[in-house]
Amino acid sequence: MKMASPIKRRVSRQIHIGKVAVGGDAPISVQSMTNTETCDVAATVAQIRRLEAACADIVRVSVPSMEAAEAFRKIREQVSVPLVADIHFDHKIALKVLEYGVDCLRINPGNIGREDRVRAVIDAAKFHNIPIRIGVNAGSLEKELQRKYGEPTPEALVESAMRHIDILDKLDFQNFKVSVKASDVFMAVAAYRQLATQIDQPLHLGITEAGGLRGGTVKSAVGLGMLLMDGIGDTIRVSLAADPVEEVKVGYEILKSLKLRSKGINFIACPSCSRQNFDVISTMNELELRLDDVTTPLDVAVIGCIVNGPGEAKEAEIGLTGGTPNNLVYVDGKPNHKVKNDVLIDHLEKLIREKIALKQEQDKDLIARS
């Protein structure tokens, strides 16, 4: 019997980033950000489409200039995934992308300048019913807070966030989410834990500038995992110095490991040892490569020997246990048939795709009946 997630999520108010609900009882969404030159519309659209194919729920695009705002308009026309415009300081850019159909603004109201400029942006966001993300980062704290605290601290991050929140409160604007990111795991976790007790808006989680693919994945998994286990977090972005598609993949893997989302195949595979009856590592590498397009949830166990193999295979929808002379395949937890090593990968891929097609057909039937 597989254990359900024991996590009890923090209660937050719900906002909408385009078609994606964030907060409340909505699933935790996975975000990424383009790293193309925004004014290169074709390249940016192509990257967004790759992120959509990887099941990114939300995509952020940097809009640093009016030229980029004009490019954003063309990008918006060509993609359907909800888009967040990342804007710093210039309220005119914010007003322009609001006009062009942005789904969320990432802009800190305290950094816009004069009160009339802040009010203009908030009034336009209200008119278009567009939420804002307040994004506090340890690397860009206000100079006053740097002097007060001497260095970035969790308290400094939260104080910065609350200053921006106070501005929105005074303008009667509650349609926002907040992030308090740091590259230091302990600082970020402490800041989010503090903020979670002070507001009821959704929280956007991230360990900023986490590093490259391997190091950043580990750091993000540790930091985000600690917060998600506390029930904190409504949307996540894994920040990697890598292909943005990898951010989405890692984000889903983190959520899958905590049983907070299920997308694609959940592989249970042994690290292999001298007991293995087939090459587990090469088999897994090839299966992951071939089945990268799969988004339907499916538990697949690939175990090289009979010590742990039967137990894991019984808990999976498709299971493989190494054996001599042939390997044993389980379907829905029961021994089904045997397969030889020389056709193992092709056979497993075919079996998995058939199982997925059957699940999709069953899902269609359920929807049709309801």
Image (cartoon, rainbow, N blue to C red):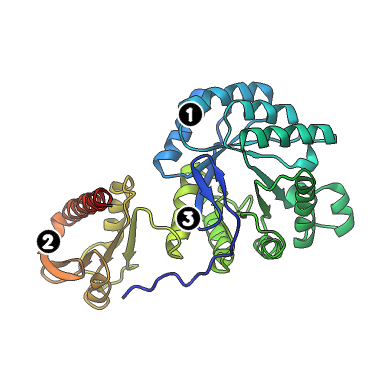
Which quarter shows the N terminus?
Answer: bottom left
Instruction: Give percent across and percent down for residue 304.
Output: 25, 68
- Residue type highlighted by circle 2: Lys
- How far is the residue under mark 3 from the one under mark 1? 26 Å
- Residue 334 lies, with reference to residue 29, above or below; the image says below
* Marked residue nearer the N-terminal end (2 or 1): 1
Please tell me whether mark 3 or mark 2 is closer to you in this view: 3
Image position, residue 267 (x, y; %):
33, 61
What residue does disc 1 label? 45
Name the one closer to the observer, 218 or 299. 299
Nearest the viewer among 30 and 369 is 369
Residue under the image location 74 percent in, 49 percent down? 139
Q: Which mark is residue 340?
A: 2
User: Which residue lies under the disc numbered 3?
Assistant: 27
Question: Nearer the viewer's eye, disc 2 or disc 1?
Answer: 1
Relative to 290, residue 348 above or below: below
Q: Amino acid at mark 1?
A: Val
Query: Tag 2: Cα neighbours inside 10 Å, few (<14), some, or many (≥20)?
Result: some
How much space separates mark 2 and mark 1, taking CA atoms?
44 Å
Q: For the residue marked with disc 3, what is the amino acid?
A: Pro
- Describe the element under mark 2 as helix, strand or loop: loop
The residue located at (75%, 56%) in the rendering is 157
Which numbered disc, 3 or 1, marks the residue closer to the eye? 3
